[in-house]
Amino acid sequence: MIQKNVPLKDYTYTKIGGNADYLAIPESIEELTKAVTFAKKNNLPWMVLGNGSNVLIQDGGIEGLVILTTSLTNMTIEHQLITVEAGAPIIEVSRTAHDHSLSGLEFACGIPGSVGGAVYMNAGAYGGEIKDVCTHVTVLTPEGEVKRLPAEEMAFDYRTSAIPEKNWIVLEAEFVLEEGEQHVIKAKMDELTYLRESKQPLEYPSCGSVFKRPPGHFAGKLIQDANLQGVQIGGAQVSLKHAGFIVNKGDATAKDYLNLVQHVQKTVKEKFGVDLEKEVRVIGRA
Ligand SMILES: NC(=O)C1=CN([C@@H]2O[C@H](COP(=O)(O)OP(=O)(O)OC[C@H]3O[C@@H](n4cnc5c(N)ncnc54)[C@H](OP(=O)(O)O)[C@@H]3O)[C@@H](O)[C@H]2O)C=CC1
Ligand SMILES: C=C(O[C@H]1[C@H](O)[C@@H](CO)O[C@H](OP(=O)(O)OP(=O)(O)OC[C@H]2O[C@@H](n3ccc(=O)[nH]c3=O)[C@H](O)[C@@H]2O)[C@@H]1NC(C)=O)C(=O)O
């Protein structure tokens, strides 16, 4: 079940990154807990990877065990409640909600992450956020306990939650939605898909927004106004379509990407006095 020295770049949206020392792809929550036990027994650090849409894995790869959740996709629907395992794509949950005439997850119809990743960072788009609909999260604690916790204990905020600090692994999330009319739900999803496709460079590998919105500003606008669009280091380029994205033009390394991130941060700071904080999670060995 646990493989050694596995390339990770095909598990990420940027198509960048070195190897994991160990990789587990559990097919059940029991197998996931066994993988954590393996890491503990062997004194290895462990981390979770979902859809790989918000990470930049460095070129030296990842020490210890990477647990990939993408095979944990069970979902049940009971009236207005959807209960779903961490590895399911949030896009699938959004589609299922539509199919059952449930409203509240339309905002997530184009969000590329897994349920676990979306909960971990309180994913949001077009005015909606996970915290608007998530009522409970079942987590595995570092001590090995499985706990079903109310959303209040997640401390959801703009692109953050309590999960990283507590070192919890999300196993399952519960979403409570409202009954709606299917054609209205569909119209909203179509509108958001149109907006996303017309504004974001989905034709190239990337990790979405590289920076958070600085208070009072939009990262993309600042980067555009600093004339940074099209600037390229190695294979990493500030997108010509949306300046808040850095795209991989084919052969970018994590080093290229991070050098460009630094260049953008420095230039925006010099021109506008604003600090751009990374939204993407940079992990692994340089
Ligand atoms: N709004 C948008 O358009 C976009 C939004 N995003 C959002 O970024 C997020 C990325 O999701 P995804 O691609 O699945 O995540 P990733 O695979 O990119 O993982 C990112 C981090 O999330 C943590 N994580 C992932 N799954 C779990 C889990 N089950 N339990 C605990 N922590 C977990 C890991 O933290 P650790 O290292 O601490 O283990 C990991 O480093 C989503 O919220 C996605 O919606 C991404 C791109 C565009
Ligand atoms: C892509 C992600 O999420 C996205 C999410 O899809 C969109 C849509 O709701 O809103 C956020 O982007 P964003 O802050 O860049 O929002 P956008 O609506 O695209 O742009 C904001 C403003 O900046 C302007 N803008 C944007 C890009 C650009 O090159 N130039 C520019 O001037 C836009 O015209 C708009 O007035 C999320 N990012 C963050 C960090 O909050 C992600 O999390 O990875």
Image: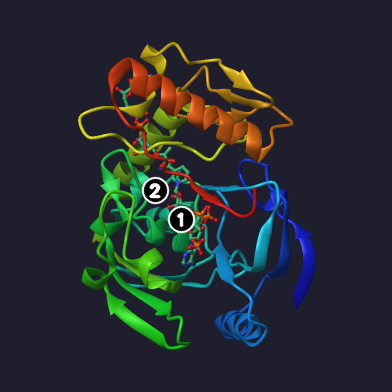
Question: Label 1 sits on what residue type?
Answer: Ile
Q: Is residue 157 above or below residue 147?
A: above
Q: Is residue 264 above or below residue 22?
A: above
Residue 76 seen in the current view: no
- Marks 2 and 1: in contact by CB < 8 Å? yes
Which residue was labeled with disc 1?
Answer: 90
The percent coordinates of residue 81 (x first, y second) are 32, 70
Q: Is residue 41 above or below residue 273?
A: below
Question: Label 2 sits on what residue type?
Answer: Ala
Name the residue: 37% across, 35% down.
192
Which residue was labeled with disc 2?
Answer: 108
The percent coordinates of residue 80 (x first, y second) are 29, 68
Element type at marker 2? helix
The percent coordinates of residue 22 (x first, y second) are 72, 69
Element type at marker 1? helix
Mark 1 nearby-residue class (10 Å; few <14, some 14–19, many ≥20): many
The percent coordinates of residue 269 (x first, y second) are 35, 24
Total marks shown come to 2
